[in-house]
Image: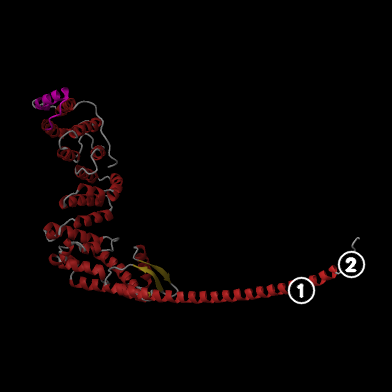
Amino acid sequence: MPAPTTTLLIEGSFSELAEEFAQYLDALRKEESSSLQSEVAPLLEPLRQQEQNEQEPDLKQRDELLKKLVAGATVLNAAPEKEITPAYNLLLHLIHQASDPSVFLSRVCTYLAKPITSSPQYGPSLAISILSTVFNTLPPSDVSRYHVLLAIIAVIRQSSSIYTFEALKPQLTTQLPNWLAAWELNEEDAQKLHLAVAETAQAAGDNGLAQTHVLEALQTIPADKASSKEARELAIRALTTALKQPTIFDFTSLTASDAVQALRSSDSTLFELLEIFTSDTLDAYDAFISASPLASISGGVLTDAGDALQDKMRLLTLTSLAASTPSRSLPYSTIASALRVPAEDVEKWVIDTIRAGLVEGKLSQLRQEFLVHRATYRVFGEKQWSEVQGRLMVWRRSLESVLGVIRNERERFVRESMQQAATAAAAADGESKGDKGGKRRNQQQTQQQQPAQAQAPVEVAE
């Protein structure tokens, strides 16, 4: 699988390795009348002299030599199993010394995308291993990586190896957007890659990833080609897959596509069905089916999907019902009427809707109601903004009421604290005055005693 960039280390000069590779291909071909070694000999001699004289190699001659080697490398898929990987590694080493390696790498990728006849059992694993080496020896921004990745995906699809695809899937999820940005592909190449991933994912049973890349492929179609035959076929494929998939309930990315919007003219009935699934209810769906049977829509692409579409429409109808209920309490009778199901089946449909992630809430068998905690908006327009505004106003009034209570309590606390502080200060002042009066009385008594002592007789010696 693609991993951090690696380097091939192979000893020997270009001319020596090229001659060795030509000899090996001749041994595989076993054709005495046509010798690849004799064909490349006139090109090898000048290159060998340049290497001996330490001169700059003639890249034009080197490219001519590589053309013959790469053309003869078609026989590598018939090489013994143990020799396939070393032989391809040698060829890759030679190709990396060309003036433009991408010219040759794309052709090598087509070889590896074909079956390895010498090892039917392990051939796909060998091819993927070699292609991964090719991918990882290239700089991250090299557009040749695009052709290598296409070849890897083709081998996985042909081998139907789920485990190999699971190993590649994390790279497709996390790295593919970065690779596409670095490679700067045109719309056609990007679409080709997304469709290849989608087909491989679908073959591996990952319908979610497949639909994701079909939608990515839709986004690559420019507005001026949205009405083309290819765009129409891709739009119908994406739309019908989304309608049939039991896990897809959001059709926003489809309605945003120019190619899907073009179906309004070319396949108006199918587009009308998309609009019903986008924002309408089961009543509208049943009325539509009565007027336009599924077998008559776009060549019958939805003929066998009647039950699946009706089940999905019930889940979406319950979602809309939960989102538009002001009280957030849905009686079982209301749900049963809207979904056209018996009352005893209401809980089953509510649970299915919760499992789909469309609503959250709590069922009450005692009260025969569904208490909605959260509901997904299928569309978000003026009506939904009005509902949000109304709920925000209710929330604002509730917060204002809570703030009023907090403000009153705070003011009461401040008043009580000030009163307590004043009382404490008054008590402290009274104690202070009492202490000062006692001190004055003590001072007066002391002053009265001192004069008495001064009047005592004093004897003076003569």
Question: From this viewpoint, is residue 82 visible?
Answer: yes
Q: How far across and down, in percent of the image, does residue 438 sit?
A: 75, 73
Q: Mark 2: few, some, or many residues within 10 Å (few <14, many ≥20)?
A: few
Q: How far across and down, in percent of the image, does residue 367 sit?
A: 43, 75
Dot label at residue 337: none
Q: Secondary structure at mark 2?
A: loop
Distance from disc 1 to disc 2, alpha carbons, whole Å, reads 29 Å
Q: Quadrant of residue 255?
A: bottom left
Q: Tell which circle, 1 or 2, labels the residue nearer the N-terminal end.
A: 1
Residue stretch in magenta? 36-59
Q: How far across and down, in percent of the image, does residue 436 sit?
A: 71, 73
Residue sitting at x 16%, y 33%: 75
In the displayed orientation, state which residue is furthest to the front: 462
Viewer-side residue, 210 vs 188? 188
Residue 57 within the magenta-colored segment of the rendering: yes
User: As shown in the figure, which amino acid type bears the numbered disc 1?
Assistant: Arg
Q: Which residue matches tag 1?
A: 441
Q: Can you say whether 34 is above or below 174 in the image?
A: above
Q: Please name which of the two marks, 1 or 2, marks the residue nearer to the observer.
A: 2
Q: Which residue matches tag 2?
A: 457
Q: How far across and down, in percent of the image, does residue 83 sit?
A: 23, 30
Q: Can you say whether 286 is above or below 172 in the image?
A: below
Question: From this viewpoint, is residue 340 visible?
Answer: no
User: As shown in the figure, which amino acid type bears the numbered disc 2?
Assistant: Pro
Question: Quadrant of the image for the N terminus?
Answer: top left
Question: Quadrant of the image for the C terminus?
Answer: bottom right
Q: Main secondary structure of the magenta part?
A: helix
Q: Quadrant of residue 47?
A: top left
* Left or right: where 453 falls relative to 214: right
* Left or right: where 322 falls relative to 436: left
Residue 363 within the magenta-colored segment of the rendering: no
